[in-house]
Amino acid sequence: MFAKKHVHLVIYDRYIRYMVSKRNRLEDVIDYGEILIKDGLIEDGKLVDKNGFKYQLERVVKQKKWKRANVSFCVSDGFVSIRHHQVPAGLKEDEVKTFLLREADDKLRLPFKNPRIDFKTIRKSETSNELLVIAYPRDLLEQFIKIMEAISLHPVVADVSSLSIWRMYEHFESDINPEQDTLVVQWGKENLVLAAFEKGLLVFSRNVTAPTENRMWSWSFEVEELQWSGSDQDLQELIDSNLLTIERFIDFYRYSVRNGEKGIEKTVVAGDFPFQDKAIQLLKEQTDMEVKDVKDYFPDFLPAKYSDLAGLVIRGNSK
């Protein structure tokens, strides 16, 4: 009997990256690549033209023979909200979720209604438990899920790309220091995602849209991916802008998130930016901390720009 295909997707405004596997192992990846999305279907991570996106994704499903495949996909990090919150001790998991949903507006102060909430218990005491709460707009998520279900796909996992990259990092890095606060930088073509991890938990993140224009990226039909078409000056300005954003994030994390007691001690850089080597070298020159390229951990038989999708493969079908 043939193993069922599992399709893994990261959806951006202008393109989709995909990875297809037969099992939850990177050795069983059978296809990966990039697909151009028609302009105007998705803007700032939100579906603008649902029917247009459905039509294009359905064509891809037929072309790639993905029908009835399980699907895991990463949602935009730009809508993720992270909170620390206290709940009474002794609550069961479903009771905790009900409690958090009740307090979403007043206590959690989420910037959106109807959230989907996941949580991790950080500390326990006799009377209360401290949670790390990760919330996402349910309506936004369900728009993608309904379209996938309508074209004979079976969405089983929705994840956040920074968490997916961290999962890949934990999988391949055998010597992680849990006391070392780590910054995961996703340097992408469309955005810059900065995610701080404390003891393996995502505690603070920022999603910054790249200060570029559409003319700076053009689709190559030869290699089937977005390639840089801006000038050398455009490129240097983009890199300088992102480096400044990273510097400000690190300072804010140290003095506002950690109250000056501790800061980022290690940075891991991932993403699909085609000038990653140059960006990493400049980042190393502006900081004293350890800076690592995700390809230092990634298997040689897959391109390192698919590290977020690799994290989805490693996660498998678990909710």
Image (tube, helix red, strand yellow):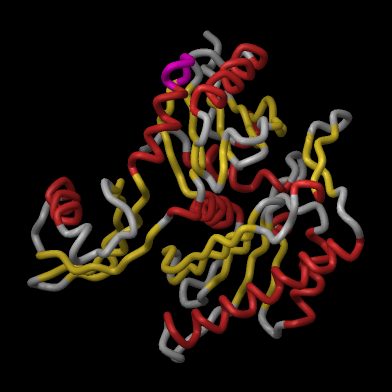
Q: Viewed as shown, does residue 48 lie left or right of 93?
A: right
Q: Viewed as shown, does residue 299 lie left or right of 101?
A: right
Q: What residue is drawn where x is 49% and y is 42%?
A: 46
The secondary structure making up most of the magenta span is loop
| Figure disc tally | 0
| Residue 287 appears anywhere in the view | yes
As for residue 151 lying within the magenta part, the answer is: yes
| Residue 174 appears anywhere in the view | no
Residue 248 locus on image (x, y percent): 60, 79
Question: In terms of image quadrants, where is residue 125?
Answer: bottom left
Q: In the rendered image of this protein, does residue 22 appear above or below residue 206?
A: above
As for residue 77 lying within the magenta part, the answer is: no
Q: Viewed as shown, does residue 241 lie left or right of 6?
A: right
Q: What residue is drawn where x is 50% and y is 84%?
A: 254
> What's the magenta region?
149-153
Residue 101 locus on image (x, y percent): 19, 52
Q: What residue is drawn where x is 43% and y is 17%?
A: 150
Q: What residue is drawn where x is 31% and y is 64%?
A: 132
Q: Nearer the viewer, residue 176 or 69?
A: 69
Q: Viewed as shown, does residue 142 lie left or right of 236?
A: left
